[in-house]
Every structure is written in C-alpha cells, then in structure tokens.
C-alpha cells in the first residue's frame, strides 16, 4: 500500500514526461501562468431591471447568483462547508496527502471508489472550469471529465492558487461559485431559495442544510427528499461539533430543529414582471444585446448580458405604464380576436415611459399569452408591424412644409385620382398598370378643392397624394428617415411608392409614437431611450448609449403641424377624443386596408402616445366585430383605438400642468368647399388594395 501510494502521489504532485506530455520545465512555466479568472472569477450573477422610480421590474439571470464578501456570509456557513467538505482545509496545502492515503485505504477496503480526496481548493478549480464552460454542454462535460490529465491540470492550478491567495479568500470564492440545487448558485442565492433570507442571517441548522447539499444537490433536495436532507444536515452538524465550531448544546438544538424551509421558487426573466411590464423588460434585453455601446460584436454583447450582475435603471414610468395598461386592458379583452398596444414617449428626450398591450407576456397560448412585443419592430422582439393608415399623412405634410409648400396650399382633391407620376430618390415612379391604379376618397361626395387644415381634419386621400406628387417621393422618404423611420417594422426597406402617403408600409407603435413625439418637441427628434443608467453590483457605472437628439424640421413647420393636427381633434375625425379639463391636444386617426388595423396617435407638449388596434397577426378584418362586449359594424381610428388613447392620456396626465402647443396662424380659404360635397367626415378608410384610409 505504501509503495502504491508513493507512486500515485509522485505522479499527481510532480507529473513527469510520459503519456500526459508534461515536463518539469513546462510545469514550472505553467505554474507562473495561472489565469486571473481563477483568482477572481467573473461569476455570472443575476441582473435586476428597475423602473424610473426604483421599483423592481424583473430579475433576470443565466445563473441565479449574488456574490458576497466574506463578512457578508454567515460564520456558521463557512464553518459548516469546510467541516463537511475538507475539515483539514486550513492545515494542508492544495494537496492533502493524508486525505489521499485515507481515500486509497478506504477504497481498497471496500472495493469501490466512493471515498474522494479532492481538497476544497481543487473542487473550487473544477467549479471555475465548469463556470467558464457556460452553456456549452460539450465544454461542461470536458470540464467534468475524471481523467488523470484533467486531475493533474487542476492540481497544478490549485497549488499555484494557494500560493497566491489566502485560504479565507479561496473559501469565499468557493462559496460564491458552488451549486446548491434548484437553480441556486452560491450561498446567497441558496439562502434566498430555501429560507427566503440573507446568508448572514442563517441559523446553524440552516447553514448545515445548505452545506450538505453540495455533495449531491438532487439526492439531498429538501423539497423532494426531506428525510434524506435532514439526515445529511445532521451529519454536517456532527462535523461542526467534532471540529469544535459549535458546542454540544448548539449541536443538540440544531439537530432538534425542523428543516424550517421557507422555499421561494426561482423568479427569473421578464415573465415574472408585474403590471404588464414584461414586454418592456424584453425590449431592454434586446437593447443590451444589440447596441454597440455594450460590446463591439454580438458575441461580446451576449456575454455581457449573460454575465449579469447589473442594476439596470430604465426610463419606464410606473404610473404611466399603469395608465397605458389599464387603457388597453379596459377597452379590449384578452379573449377578443383583436389586441391593442400602446407606447408613450417623452417629447424632447426620447424616453420610453410606457409600453403596454392587451395580450399578456408568456408562453401559454391557451391563456392568449405571447412573447411577441406588438409595440416594437421585429428585430427588437416584435412582429412585422401594421399599416399606420392616415397617421402617416402628417409626415407627408412635414416634408412639404419643409420644402416651402405653404400651409395654405390648395389642391383640387378630386373624389378619385389615378396615381400620378412621381419623382423618387433614384428616378421616377410611373403608374404603368392596366388599368391604372386609382386612389379614392371615402365617399362619392368628398371632393375639393381643399387646403391643408381641412384636408387633414377630414383625412382626404387625394389631397395628400397630390401634395406627395409636388414634393416628391424622395422628400417624403427622407423626412420619414429623419423622424426615425428607416425601414419597415419587418426590417425590409421602405418602398418609394405613392401609397406611402396613405400609410401602407407597416410600422410599430413605438416608431409612430416617436414620430409624434418629434411633432410635440417642435421638430427635435430623439432616438428612443429605454435605459437611463447601469451599475454593477459593486457600484461601478457602466457606460450607456447617450441620448441622440437632432432638430429635423423648423419651428415654423412644427407650429403648422400642431395647428393642423389640433384641428383633427377639434373639428375633424378625432373631435370626440378631447381630454379632461379641455387640455390642448393634437393627433391623427388612421385605418388600414380592409380594416385590419386602426390607430390614433396624438400628443400634448409633455407626452406622445401611439395606440394600435387589430389582429395580432394582422389578419382580422374589423367589420361586424365585437370588442370588449361592444358590437362594431366597422372599426375606425376614432372609435377603436381613439378611446384607448383618451383613457391612457387622461390617467397619465392627471395632476400634470396644462401646457399649450405653439400654433401657427393659418387663415381659412376665402372660398370654402361646398358643405354638400364634404361627404362622411368620420374616420373611414378607403377599401381598395392601394391604400388607405382615414
């Protein structure tokens, strides 16, 4: 036995050239090159996402872990783990020669390999290797392989580690990295999981229970196998007494104590978010994984997110979120065939203040849950978007006003119009179809001439097509780009076609809310902002993307747009959507082809909100339909999403000071259209495949 032991020890502690391919020289060099990750491992931790008032939205993690310092840990926990795992930890080096001899002798007697001889430091090194493997199953298996080569590599690192770190620090690192079952990594997560308290507050019995889990977290799981867990706990308590870390009285009292579990299920991910905040939580995740501010490559950003340990403070206002959520949930049932979504943005900053939708965040389709964020573009976790209908017309007006076309510009605005030839950025668009594509107004009597104020109020299709022809498709596209519309919601490029003016290219509510926030901010466009500040768990600031704001059109254009959009809510298609206290507003209704989407987008100086209503997949025609128990022959922007917008804005602005929008003096035409020719002034869309609606 002595001879065999000596040979094994020599091979483990001082590996020689042979099948493993190690030499004394290479071993010495390897000892000098221990990666820093073993000294201070970059452990994955939980990230917490907070709203703008400091409330917790959700806790997300790849591994549930909170790293503690030694003085934040229970002394009972530290003693219990050492006593059961490696009682001579403070007496031996990285290799416990007595332990190895004892293991060889015990295994020889029993004919098994049940008795191990790894020191706590060696176990820690193995855990670091597993941690570094992450979610790569192959790498994890490799890190756990029980081969002589792997054992020697771990020993080499352990020996060097004990030269560089004090024992107390190695123990602290071990207690932070070790797995305690039920998704809990490290002693703090384990304490919260099983006892709903911090590790520093554990009793002797509780600390002993956790320490006993390490050997086999499944077999000693106190929820599934309480008797086995208690027996293992008592073994640990006995070891603590044997090593004089507790008295006989304390040991007896601890063994007499019940398990005393106060188990708390893992609360991980955006699915745990409250008050409908799950979709915004998911949007934050997409921001971190896609913004170059958080890493040069996609892999870098994924690693940053998975590493965790962040406190992410967001722009989400919980009061406005509640207002938006109450509005969409109060006007559309989860079980309805259609859904509603609303986004609120602060003008002048781009801060996303609310993001709500009727369908709850989750994976259970039987409960009408979804993880598709209907408020955002596909790349940010959304779908393909929805046709914004006439809510796109103000963009055409902005392009025309910036090009010098006056707000009093009059067009013939016939009842029907063949799409005319138009200039694009690359050439010319021609209506070459046979028969030629025609755009109609809503009713046979609706015909001009009209000026901008009345055309916007009544949402006259042919007026905006004629305006689009004069300013050119390229100018409209360029204005859309300045307002943040650089592609469709699906990521496909915008198409320079005349029906663009009528809102046939799919957008997301976030995109349209940001357009109208730019109108409210007098032409200052700010990229949407979801993250205000990020700190690490140890208090260090993480740089976040700076707000990007730019003046994209003049104050004169802004005042004109305020005036014509205020007219929509005073005497046009949105006249029934006034806010409490006669608060001044501006906005635009919109309805898409075949009633598959309806919108109302509007603003005050303090707040811009876009509301969409339709089938989540875009395929529900809102005719002869019941929504929230109310029957609709047809759904338009004013009577579908309009009331949702009004409810959301009333609650969100309750108590806020009234502010006025800067307005322009746009004289009415000398000769007004014959009232008999104005047709139906409700917000009703055209039903041809070419376009648009009101």
Image (tube, rainbow, N blue to C red):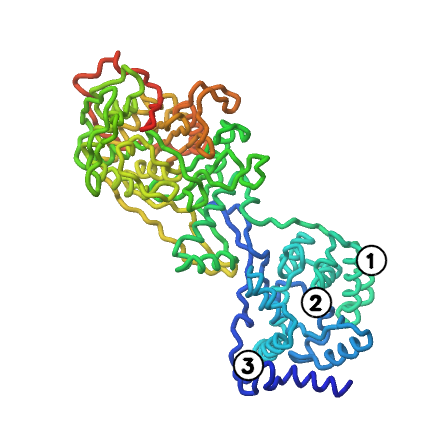
Q: Mark 2 points at which residue?
A: 81
In the displayed structure, 587 sits above or below 13; it is: above
Question: Callout 1: 10 Å neighbours few (<14), some, many (20+)?
Answer: few
User: Which secondary structure, mark 2?
Assistant: helix
Foreground pick, 524 / 217: 217
Left/right placement of residue 398 relative to residue 87 reads left
Q: Marks 2 and 3, Cα distance to the nearest angstrom?
A: 28 Å
Left/right placement of residue 342 relative to residue 225 reads left
Badge number at residue 256: 1
Q: Which of marks 2 and 3 is in front?
A: 3
Q: Are marks 2 and 1 in contact (CB under 8 Å)?
A: no
User: Which secondary structure, mark 3?
Assistant: helix
Badge number at residue 384: none
Q: Which circle's residue, 2 or 1, is located before the other in the chain?
A: 2
Name which residue lies at 64% across and 77% down. Answer: 148
Question: Callout 3: 10 Å neighbours few (<14), some, many (20+)?
Answer: some
Q: Marks 2 and 1, Cα distance to the nearest angstrom?
A: 20 Å
Q: Residue 449's spot in the image, x, y percent?
A: 20, 20
Q: Which circle's residue, 2 or 3, is located before the other in the chain?
A: 3
Q: Name the residue under label 3.
A: 31
Q: Which circle's residue, 1 or 3, is located before the other in the chain?
A: 3
Q: Marks 1 and 3, Cα distance to the nearest angstrom?
A: 48 Å
Q: In which quarter of the image is residue 472?
A: top left
């Amino acid at each position: 036995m002595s001879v065999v032991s000596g040979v094994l020890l020599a091979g483990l502690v001082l590996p020689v050239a042979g099948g493993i391919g190690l030499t004394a020289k290479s071993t010495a060099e390897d000892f000098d090159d221990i990666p820093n990750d073993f000294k201070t491992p970059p452990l994955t931790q939980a990230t917490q996402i907070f709203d703008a008032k400091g409330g917790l939205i959700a806790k997300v993690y790849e591994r549930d872990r909170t790293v503690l310092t030694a003085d934040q840990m229970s002394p009972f926990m530290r003693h219990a783990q050492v006593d059961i795992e490696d009682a001579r930890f403070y007496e031996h080096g990285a290799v416990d020669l007595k332990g190895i001899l004892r293991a060889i002798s015990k295994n020889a007697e029993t004919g098994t390999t049940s008795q191990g001889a790894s020191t706590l430091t060696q176990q820690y090194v193995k855990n670091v290797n597993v941690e570094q493997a992450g979610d790569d199953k192959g790498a994890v298996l490799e890190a756990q392989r029980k081969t002589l080569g792997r054992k020697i590599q771990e020993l080499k690192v352990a020996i060097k580690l004990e030269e560089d770190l004090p024992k107390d620090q190695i123990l602290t690192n071990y207690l932070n990295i070790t797995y305690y079952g039920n998704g809990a990594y490290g002693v703090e997560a384990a304490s919260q999981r099983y006892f709903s308290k911090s590790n520093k507050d554990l009793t002797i019995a509780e600390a002993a229970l956790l320490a006993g889990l390490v050997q086999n977290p499944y077999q000693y799981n106190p929820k599934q196998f309480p008797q086995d867990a208690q027996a293992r706990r008592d073994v640990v308590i006995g070891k603590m007494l044997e090593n004089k870390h507790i008295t006989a009285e304390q040991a007896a009292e601890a063994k007499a104590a019940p398990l005393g579990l106060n188990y708390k299920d893992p609360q991980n991910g955006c699915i745990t978010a409250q008050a409908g905040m799950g979709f915004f939580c998911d949007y934050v995740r997409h921001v971190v994984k896609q913004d170059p501010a958080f890493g040069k490559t996609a892999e870098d950003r994924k690693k940053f997110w998975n590493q965790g340990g962040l406190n992410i403070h967001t722009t989400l206002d919980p009061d406005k979120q509640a207002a938006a959520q109450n509005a969409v949930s109060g006007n559309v049932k989860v079980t309805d065939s259609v859904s509603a979504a609303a986004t609120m943005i602060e003008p002048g900053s781009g801060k996303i203040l609310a993001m709500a939708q009727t369908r709850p965040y989750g994976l259970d389709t039987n409960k009408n849950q979804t993880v598709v964020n209907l408020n955002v573009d596909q790349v940010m976790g959304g779908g393909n978007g929805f046709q914004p209908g006439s809510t796109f017309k103000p963009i055409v007006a902005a392009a025309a006003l910036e090009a010098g076309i006056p707000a009093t510009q009059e067009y013939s605005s016939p009842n029907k119009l063949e799409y005319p030839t138009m200039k694009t950025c690359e050439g010319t668009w021609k209506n070459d179809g046979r028969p030629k594509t025609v755009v109609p107004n809503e009713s046979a009597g609706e015909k001009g001439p009209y000026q901008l104020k009345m055309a916007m109020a009544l949402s006259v299709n042919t007026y905006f097509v004629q305006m689009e022809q004069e300013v050119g498709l390229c100018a409209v596209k360029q204005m859309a780009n300045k307002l943040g519309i650089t592609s469709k919601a699906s990521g496909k490029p915008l198409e320079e076609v005349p029906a663009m003016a009528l809102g046939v290219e799919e957008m997301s509510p976030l995109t349209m809310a940001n357009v109208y926030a730019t109108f409210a901010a007098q032409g200052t466009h700010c990229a949407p902002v979801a993250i205000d500040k990020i700190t690490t768990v140890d208090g260090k600031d993480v740089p976040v993307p700076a707000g990007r704001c730019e003046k994209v059109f003049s104050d004169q254009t802004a005042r004109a747009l305020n005036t014509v959009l205020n007219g929509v809510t005073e005497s046009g298609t949105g006249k029934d959507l006034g806010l409490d206290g006669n608060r001044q507003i501006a906005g635009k209704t919109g309805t898409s082809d075949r009633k598959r989407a309806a919108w109302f987008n509007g603003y005050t100086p303090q707040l811009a909100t876009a509301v969409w209503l339709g089938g989540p997949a875009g395929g529900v025609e809102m005719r002869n339909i019941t929504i929230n128990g109310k029957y609709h022959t047809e759904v338009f922007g004013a009577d579908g999403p309009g009331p949702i917008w009004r409810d959301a804005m009333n609650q969100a602005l309750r108590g806020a000071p009234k502010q006025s929008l800067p307005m322009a003096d746009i004289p009415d035409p000398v000769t007004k259209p014959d009232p008999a020719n104005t047709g139906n002034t409700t917000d009703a869309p055209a039903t041809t495949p070419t376009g648009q609606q009101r």
